[in-house]
Structures are given as structure tokens and as C-alpha cells.
Amino acid sequence: MRHFEMDKLKARGGSVGQSKFHDSAVKQVCGSAKYVDDNPEPAGCLHAYPVLAPITRGVVKSIDTRKAEALAGVVRIFTASDVPGKLDIGPVFPGDILLTDNEIQYHNQPVLLVVAKSYDVARRAARMVEIECRSSEAVLDIKTAVEQQNWVRPPHSLQRGDAEAAIANAAHTLSGELHVGGQEHFYLEGQVAMTAPNEDGGMSVYCSTQHPTEVQHLVAKVLKQPFHFVTVETRRMGGAFGGKETQAAPWACLAALATYHLGCAVKLRLARADDFRLTGKRHPFYNHYRVGFNDDGLVEGVHIEVNGFCGYSPDLSDAIVDRAMFHADNAYYYPAAKIIGNRCKTNTMSHTAFRGFGGPQGMIVAELIMDDIAAALGKDPLDVRKANLYQPGRDVTPYHQTVEQHVMGDMIAQLERDADYRQRRAAIKQHNSNSPFIKKGLSMTPVKFGISFTVQHLNQAGALVHVYSDGSIHLNHGGTEMGQGLNTKVAQIVAHAFGVDFETVGITATRTDKVPNTSPTAASSGTDLNGMAALNAANTIKQRLVDFIAEYFGVEAESVEFNNNQVTYDNGQISFAELANLAYMKRISLSSTGYYATPKIHYDREKAEGRPFFYYAHGVALSEVEVDVLTGENTVTRVDILHDVGSSINPALDVGQIEGAFIQGMGWLTTEDLQWNDDGKLASFGPATYKIPAIGDTPAEFNVSLYDSANPETSVFRSKAVGEPPFMLCFSVWSAIRDAVSSITDYRYLPSIDTPATPERVLNAVNVSKAWLAKQTSNAEPESTHV
Amino acid sequence: MIQFLLNNTPVTVENSRPTITLLDWLRKDRGLVGTKEGCASGDCGACTLLVGEQVAHGSSEKQWRYKTINSCLMLLGNAHGKHIVTVEAVTQNLYADVDELHPVQKAMVESHGSQCGFCTPGIIMSLLALYINNASYPGKKAVIHALGGNLCRCTGYQPILKAAEKAFEYERQPVAWAATADSFARSLRNAGNSLKEIPSLRFEQNHFYVPQSLKQLVNLKNQCPEARLIAGGTDLSIEFTQQLTEPAIIISVTQVTELIQVSDSGDGLVIGAAATYADFIELFCRHYPESKELFERLGSEQIRNGGTLGGSLGNASPIGDPAPLLIALDATLELVSIAGTRHVKVEDFFTGYRQTVLTANEVIRQVLIPKRPASLKLASHKISKRFEDDISTVCLVLAVDHADDQITAVRCAMGGMAALPARAKTVEQQLLGASLSQHSFNQAASALAQDFSPMSDVRASAEYRLTVSQNLLTRIGYEFCQPIDVVNVAEQPAVRIAHASL
């Protein structure tokens, strides 16, 4: 059952609120939607491929390119010394090296660039380069990095009240730790860029990136050229999920380097295994907590430390670990809290943005704490969660932002009722007592996710709207389309503003020469920012038209309305198309830019206080799982979700984001198992060993509903961001697996399960639980109910 | 040269690199870029397309049958005689409206089944095969089996499942290319009758041969003992696309008439080495229904449509699922060379990691599986991180014969536990002569550590492999000794988890 088919907002009479199809859907099903590698290559286009370091840490001693150069079709091999401008392409802080000329900091770090006449020859030649190195000891273990205080950026901490005193004075205390696995983005379209000289003496860059402006800036800096030298175009990406926010840039920069020297088009596309090896992933984390709580399970104080496994460079890790810290409370009030976040430097690829941007890795601690408290007190975990929710009077976060919208309690109550939580809980207990091998588990977890870039200046956007003299509309904005339907939503907003059909609005590729100085399409902000910028552009044109009508027809401006492709005014009516033509003939400008900057937000990092988030998005999920206690195999059998997207601009696209994010999160916590060998080589470097959910892994029953509630803040049409928040609904799966295993001890012992909860980890938890049970039976004196 | 039908166009190719995949050829040589490269290793399905082949139905004239394959694994040379259908042929109007689309495309649009769209052409082709091969909606399990090899990272699959159902709700659309395909088949038959040469591709000194008879195959292999044999390419092609190897000569066994036969001889089953899984699963599972889950979880639909027993055994993968099953069933391989025919037990076929008893001029002709004893009990279990389209962490197959309540014969074979698929001989000794009771299997489980010292790798630790194998023996004891319907284990909630595809 998918509930979005009812378009409750259709009554608005415009496009907003309707489940319009994705603007590329027809092209996508016909195979005619073009991605970077699909576009025809300019005559003489060459292919570039990086030469990769054979060791994990050390220095380059010598390089022998003779064999590679002898291969037919090889045109040139570039080194770091061929870079005319900056070699360091760190997006925020320095540290990301385009080509290393000496120090190797992770296995397979690019050292050289081969350019050849074909993709095959470039790949082959890249492997023929012999690189001799001197190895030194690599840091691969996060605990070692913490002990050595080996950071990519300094630690940061949040503090509210006296956490230590609160914990010390509490009736009960607990502590726990958790290793949280990373995640490969596995966008279906791998990293790719094509660069070509353009006739204005500049360079065109076609790149699958979430951040065309940053690619533009980095290419220009690498080539020591002004920004206007470079024009970046991104029509669409074949998936991104954060993996093309900063990680798309190196390949564009390398192709640009070759184009700069060779004067012809150059394409660089990573083979899947190299995409795995070279690009950053979701940060693995190692977290631990201490909590004090009362007999009712109410938290009185917490001390949480989150340690992000950042890889060799800062990349975006500062903001990512910040977001993990900002979400270590999830939806729960901590009267006193100390939250420490460390950014650990390790010799791997540099971990990066991935849907949730650290939020999930922090938030899981809150859910760990809730389940552990419930187990310790023998309470239903849902009751503990409900008791700890933010509510009026208990509403200040560890970073001192006041939570103003309190819908979480109502959402949980609604889902608890609609999905029969209590009855199913009882039925599952009954099942488990009769089933020797298959145990069921159930868990409901909430999500409260802060919306806004925590880096303040990124919260701005631009758009460009043209109305042509036939009334058709052309739209550009600074956001990029990666499948989420951003272009569709922004077009709906513009169509709605002019009161015209959705089809009236045409959208073309995102280009840095159309809308400049843009932010990445990230942080779930695409529609919030670009939709508002486009609305402002549309409103500027609309105001000119209203003023024109008032003057031309001699009517009150207040009487003018745009609706159903018509413009009505006092005693008159004109079609939008006729109006456009008339306005053109009367020399009214029909083109405008639009701009938007998010209000209200601020954060003082010195004091660790402020309002980093404009608003919060909410959701709640109930998951039921089955666990095989002989093998540790597990499966999700039913999921019910209630999610808050404010007033939905496109319910179908929003539900699509919710379903897709949930399954992606489920994969992160269950089957997606990144593994590195002891020598620092990525062992799971392809889909044969790294398993994202397949179609059969989706729950047999999957119900998604949208919570009926407008955004109290003045977001675009009172909608809410939806890209990331539903990802974190997946904690219900992990929590339900723990619940199922806990049934072995009749819920007296709740084993810890690091993520992903692979069959092996779950079987270990089963065996630990059985050992606990055996010990209880043999000991007359039962020990603590929680370890 | 080779000849095939590409969408609506007959194509002849003479000069092309023998290792080129159909995917690269379509995208680079033909500019048909609707088919996408997601992983180039057969794991994601973005490159899925349809391959039509002429199949005899009883005594009537041969008819086209369409199946999905991964074009990143299928080598161009293997297209000889086939009809290759890409997404571009499904709806040809570049400016089509939603209502002008093929039902599977329309259903995907209306169900909001594409987001980033990169997996979508592959999904469309898998849905199209499902549509062509079923007159009405075949049910959710059939959809999951058909699309298990099509990864989507955006949607979470709900709208795709919905689209699969919806496609059958519109007015049925006939196959658009039927006339062209039939006329191509006729022209090929006419040409084939006069064909003297073995269809082949060449590029400089490299060759790809597509022999049509066993005699041609054996002669070729004798002349070129260094040649690599290829069938579906589900394993070997990855060597070409990932390791970038470039053998001088490749011989395809896919069209050797004698190697693609599948039959029940009365004394047992005879499975041609180049028969695809899709070709023999039904017959096999009629005799051994307990192996159904193992086959259904072997790779994906696209892999089962290309993969063969000859390929799996010939490559001697330590983790291939067929070997433990065939060893447990005491199957025999028939090997042929210019010198004649010999028979080798599957169990004796492997000599080391990726090594076999095959001589350089020898080929596997067929697999012989003995007739099933009436009282045989069989259990086959696979453990993997993901349920579908994943390589086994451990595969355990146990065949037990019994008289009254005593075990009279036992063969236990495992994959993933050693460098080779191998028998668990201590376990077998423990069980032989023991009573058919849970206790016996629990006892046997504890003996397993004497048979194997498994490795730790990316799939699991050595400890897990050993523990889970022991637990599987416990489960098998439960299955054998309780009144459980092993064929429909999915309906036994106490025994197996309720995975959607079971």
C-alpha cells in the first residue's frame, strides 16, 4: 500500500501537491536519458586513467613508465609536476592531493595520469607503470588513531548542564559501545567526467557531480585560471547519495589537466572496482556512551563520544562529525549532556558525504541507549522512547537550539495504533516461545533530523527563469538532478506560481554559466533552497506582469490572478500565452534571476551554541524481522512508516525518497559490509563482495504514509526536506534484530550487535546470549541483567 | 564472420576483438548507449538485454525464445545466430508520450519506478522478458526471481514491484519484432545449410570460434590447446574486463549441439556441459526438488540464463554451488578429446585451486547424475550475506539413504570450506550406520572440525564458517527427522526465515 495516490492538495489548482512523474521518466524507460558517458565523444577524444599506488602508506622511490609508454595508443603520461596551479584540491581544508609526487597516504592513491586513444589502452597502460615505494606503518585501526590523537581536524564538543554530576546522581547507570560500519554509495553510474576546449579559449566540463560550482573552482585552480575559464554542465547523475559532492571533482580535474596540455577532449571514467578503491565512503564510526537514568527510564545525563573514521584527509569530515554530534540526541531530551566528536585520521581513502552526512552514525547511539535502558529496566523499548521525547519544557538540545515543533509523540501514537504495535508485540512473544530456530523481533524508532547546511554560507541558492513570448517557460536553478526529482519539484513550483500547466515549464542541464556560485545539492536542501530561489524569480516576473496588466488594462493590481493557464483581472481575462506575447510587444522584461538565503540560522562554534537548523523533519518506523538462530540470517518482513514532509510538493516523489532511503539504510545496517585487509587494501571492492539490497530483500509488507502537517517555518509551500531524514528510519531494523535475539533469554539480556548486522555478527550475538543463559542457569546468583 | 539480428537489423561482424563484450560493442561500435555499464561484472543488471534464440518445441518448427542476459558478460561472438534486443527497440519514438510506451515502460513511469534512471533500461528489459514469457501477471515471487539481478539504489524496489503487476493490466501488446525475427531465422537457416566454415571473429592474430558440433569443438581444441573455452562467460569474462587478459584464441561451446542436450535417460539425468541453468533446472528439480532453492539462489536470472555446469566445474571455483550438489549426488563427468571419451567423478575432477584433471585438448561434454534411490533424503543449504545473487559463504549438501531408521549411505559435500569443493568424510563416517535421529546429526556436526579448517575472508571468518556448518547439520537433522515438507520449507515458519523470494 502506497498512500500518495490521494493528492490531497490538488484543490490548490496548480501543480504543487500533485504526484507529477519525474521529468525524465519517459526518457529513462526508453534508454534515451543521457548520462555523461552516453554523450557522443568529440572527434579525437582521448581517454585518461589514473596510475595507482601499490602500497598503503609510504613514499614513492622511483617510477618507470617505459613499458606503458611503449604500448600502442598511449599519448602521454602526466605527473604532479604537470599541474600548473594547485595540486591540493581539498574542498574546505587542504589535504586532498590530485596526483601525489611523493607521499602515499592510502592504498591505490593516484600517482600519475595515463592518457591514451582508448579507454582500454589507458586502463592497460596504467597497470604497466612500475612504481617502487618505501612502505611505512599505516594507521588502519580507529582505536589506535584515537589513542594517538591522530586527527584530520581538531575535536569538538557540545555541552549542556553537568553531565558527569547527573550520571553520578542517577538511580541507574549504563555504558555501552558500538562499531558502526561505513557504506559504499554504489551509485549505479560510476564517477565520470569529460572535458573539452571551447571556442572562447576556456574549457567545458561535463561531469556527474552534485556540486558543479566546486568542480568549476577546482578545475580553474588546478589550471591556474580564473573561474570564468571553466563552464561545468551536469544534466543528471545516475545516483549520487553524497558520493558526488566532493568525490566527482578529482576526475574532472585530471581530465581537465589532460585537455589543458593536449588541447583536445578527454574523458575519464573509473571502472567500478577502482571507484570502490579510490572514492570516499560513509564514515565508519566507533562510539561509546555512559548514561544515568531514573526508574522510569528517563535519561538524566549522558556522556557520548563519537569517533569518525575519516581516512587520510579532512574532506568534509569536520561537518560530518559535527552532524553526528548534533544528532546523538535524535528525538530525545537529555537534561545534561556532554558530546565529544573526534575526527580520526586513518590510511584509507578519505571518507565523505553520504545521505545523512554523519547524522545516522550519531543518531544510532541514541537508539542504542534507549534499547539498553529498556532492557535494563525490563520495559517495552517504545515506552522508554516515548517518555524521553522532546516536549514543551523539555525542549533544549545539547547545542542549545530549542525544539519548537512537537509532533513526534503524535506520530508515534498514530503509527502505534495503525500498525497494531501492542498486539503484534504480544503475538511475537508467543511465536518466539514456540519456535526453536526462527525468532521474530519488533521495534519502532523515531527520527528527528535537522535541516540546513551546518556551514552557514552554503544556505543560499539562485535560479534563472525565462518566460518566452509564447508563454512557455524555461527554468534553470543551481541544484542538480540525481534522481530525487528536484527538477520536477522546482518546475511544479514555477508552474504553480504562474498558474500554468506543469508541461509549460522546460528544464535544462545545470550549468555554472547559467546560475553561478551555487551550493552543492546536498543536506536534503535541494528543493528548500532552489525551489525558493526559483519561486522568487517567478514572482519577480509575475510582479512585472501584474504591474503591466494594472497599467495596460487600467485595473487594480490586487484583482489580478494567475490560474489554469489564464490571467484574470477586473472584468477581464487573457491567456498566459497571450499575456506573455503582449508583455513582450510592450517591452516588459520576461526573464529574471531569483535568490534565496535561509533565515534564522546561526551557530557559534566557539561556544557550541546556536540554531544550526531552520527546522526539523520527523519520521517514525516500525519494523518486524525474523532471525534464524542457527545461522544468523535475518530478514525484514514488515515495515510501517509515518513520515513528516510538511505539505508535500509531490507526494509520489516524497514517498519514493522515503522508501528508497529506508531500504538504503536497511542495507547499511544489514548486508553492506565494507572490509579492509590487514595491509589496508579494500577487500570488498565490487558488487560481488559488497551486497546492497536486492529486490527480494525488500519487506514483504511495506506501508508508507505521509504525516498530515504543514511546516511551521516559512519553507517553500510549507514543505519539508526529504532526501536524508527517512534514511535513519532504518534503526528500527537493527533494533528489531537485537529484540529478536533477546528473545533467546526471554528478553532478560540484550546483546550488543555492531553494524552491519551480518549473519555472522547476529550468530555471534545469539551465541553470546546462549552463553549468558547457560551462566544464569548454572549460577544460583543471577548477575546484572545487562552487560 | 558471425551473423545476428540486432533489434530490427541483421548484422554481420568479421573483425572484432575476441574478448569484446556485447555491452562494449553496442555502446562503442554501434552507439547504442541505452544499455548501461554499472559494474561490468554481471552483478548489477544495468546492462541487461534480451537474447532471442531459436528453440524447438516438440516436433513443430523452431520458435524464438527470449531471455535476459548481462551484456557485460556475454561476448560478442556468442551473439551468432541470436536476436539481440536492446532498450532502444522497445519504443522507437524518441518523443513518445506516456501512452505510446510499451506496457512495461508505461507501468514504470506511472508507478514512479525510475529515479536516477541508470538501472532503468536494465529493469525494463527484465520486465519485458517477464512480460513476453507470461500471458498474465505471474505473481510477486516470479517478479523477484526475474529481477533479482537488477540492482536499484534509489527506489527501494516498491514501485518496480508495482510496475511489474501493472504492466499486465493494460491492453496486451504483441512482440513488435516477430516478423523481422522470423525472416532473419529463415535466412540464417538457408545460409546455415550451405555454411562450411565455423562462425568466427578475428582481430589481428586473435580469434573467436563458435563451433556447432562436438567434432568441430574437439578438433579445434586439439589444434589450439591453449585456447580458452567459454560458455556464458559468467566467470571468464570478468578476467577480460577486470584483469584485462587477452587470450589469443577463445572457443565458445554455447552452440555445440551435443553439449546443450538435457535429458532423463531412465538411468539418471544427462546434462550437457553447455546447457544453461535455465535449460535444466526444471528437469533437475523434478528429480531433486530439495535443490530448487540452491538453483534459484545461484546468481541471478541473467546468470542462470547464461551460466552452465561445464563453465562452473571447468573453472574449478572453490565456491561454485553446483559442485557440492553434484559431489553429494555422486555425479560423473564425461570428458572428450580427440583421443576419445573418459569418465571422471565430479569429486575427483578438482586437483587444486582452480585446477582440474582436464588435459589441454579435452572438453567436458556432459554431466551424468545417477538415478535417485527411492529412499534418498537430500538437503542443500547455502549461507550468504545477501539472500539473492550472492556467492556462498558456505554451501552444504547432504544426501542420505536409509533403511528403516538406519542410515545406509551418506555423502556430504561442502563449498566455501576449503580451496576445493570437498566431501566431509568424518561427518559421513559418523552418520553411516547411525540411526536417523536428531542426535546422530548433532554428533556428526561436532565431527565437522576434523574435516575442514576453513579460511577467513571478505565473506566470513573461519569460526563462522565452521559454526554455521555445524548448525546446518543440526537443522538438517531436524528436517530429516521431523515431518517437514522439505520441498516447501518456506511454508514452515519454524524452519526457515520468511524471505520474500522463497
Image (spheres, coloured by chain):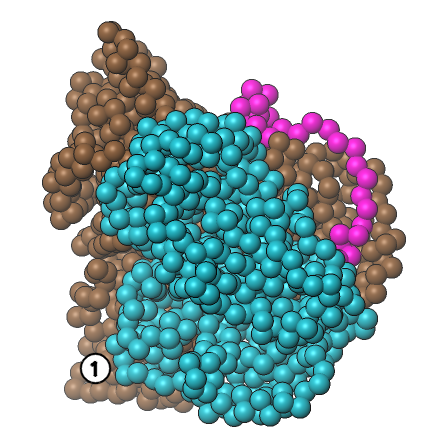
Q: Which residues are magenta?
A: A122-151
Whether residue A472 is situated above or below residue A420 in the rendered picture: below
Is A139 on the left-hand or right-hand side of B393? right
Q: Tell me where residue A554 sits by quadrant.
A: bottom left
Q: Nearer the viewer, residue B291 or B376?
A: B376
- State the cyan chain: B
Q: Residue furthest front?
A: B403
- State the brown chain: A
Whether residue A692 is situated above or below residue B76 in the rendered picture: above
Residue at the spot x=19%, y=66% of the render? A6
Name the amino acid type tagged 1.
Tyr
- Kindly identify which residue carries mark 1: A569
Residue A337, visible in the rendered structure: no
Is A521 on the left-hand or right-hand side of A385? right
Q: Position of residue A638 (x, y in %)?
A: 25, 48
Chain under disc 1: A
Q: Position of residue A616 (x, y in %)?
A: 30, 44
Residue A67, visible in the rendered structure: yes
